Image: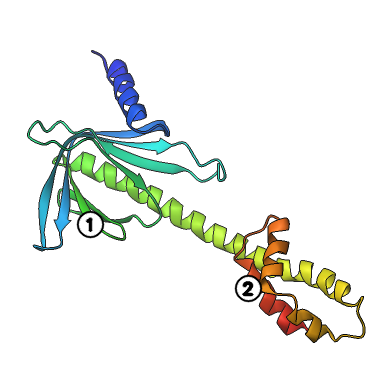
Amino acid sequence: MNEINIRKINEQILRFNDKKYKELIITISLAQLFEWDTKNNQWKFSGIKGPLFLYERQPKILNPNKKQFAFQILNQNSESNQVNYLETIKSNFNLKNEDEFVFYSKKNFIKGIYVPIQSLKKELFIKLNEIQQNFEKLEKQEKIIQNNQANQIPRLLTPKIISSMDNFPEISRKERFTDLTKEKLSQIIKNLALNDQFVTYIYNALNNYL
């Protein structure tokens, strides 16, 4: 069986395990998954051993420009009843390269991928690290955009709200503003298809403006 046919078979398996599979990036012929045992403070073999596939996933519909990634280890360990292992890669994916292992951690666990061939282990770490750095860059860009939006929203909304208050000159602006609750502001935000996180920001901005 040639390499093209092997690749097609592997992609069929990956797509069966993950409906969002898009494109294969690298293949590691043999990898073993280890887990950190917090009770005994030591590494233990998870029972998962086989080829590892790092690949790109289909992006989310609401955020098509943000790429998604994952890897699978197809378990070929006949002594284990563990199924194939799938791990999605997100921004909280912390990496460490040490000896024959690529260690990674998330909020609640630490795991290690053992790759006996150094060149393949190095390639895996480089690719994972590139993905991680791209996530960090994208998050910084998103924060800048959100901050810019947050700074603009009060300037856009305040004149309209203040103008509507001026229809009641017998009541002070400050008194009228106290009736403009966060619930009402929240409804305004939703009508404008903006994020609810700006409600408190706008409320405080209006309070200072008046």
Q: Secondary structure at mark 1?
A: strand
Q: For mark 2, what is the residue?
A: 200
Above/below status of 203 relative to 126: below
Q: Quadrant of residue 205?
A: bottom right
With 197 as the anchor, is 129 left or right in this view? Answer: left
Q: For mark 1, what is the residue?
A: 110
Q: Residue at 49% of width from left, 40% of height from top?
A: 59
Q: Residue 116: horizontal and vertical position, in percent?
A: 13, 41
Amino acid at the residue labelled 2: Thr
Q: Quadrant of residue 145?
A: bottom right
Q: Residues within 10 Å of mark 1 (few under 14, many from 20)?
A: some
Q: Residue 68: horizontal and vertical position, in percent?
A: 44, 43
Above/below status of 114 relative to 208: above
Q: Residue at 28% of width from left, 42% of height from top?
A: 123
Q: Secondary structure at mark 2?
A: helix
Q: Residue at 23% of width from left, 13% of height from top?
A: 1
Which of these two is toward me, 184 or 130? 184
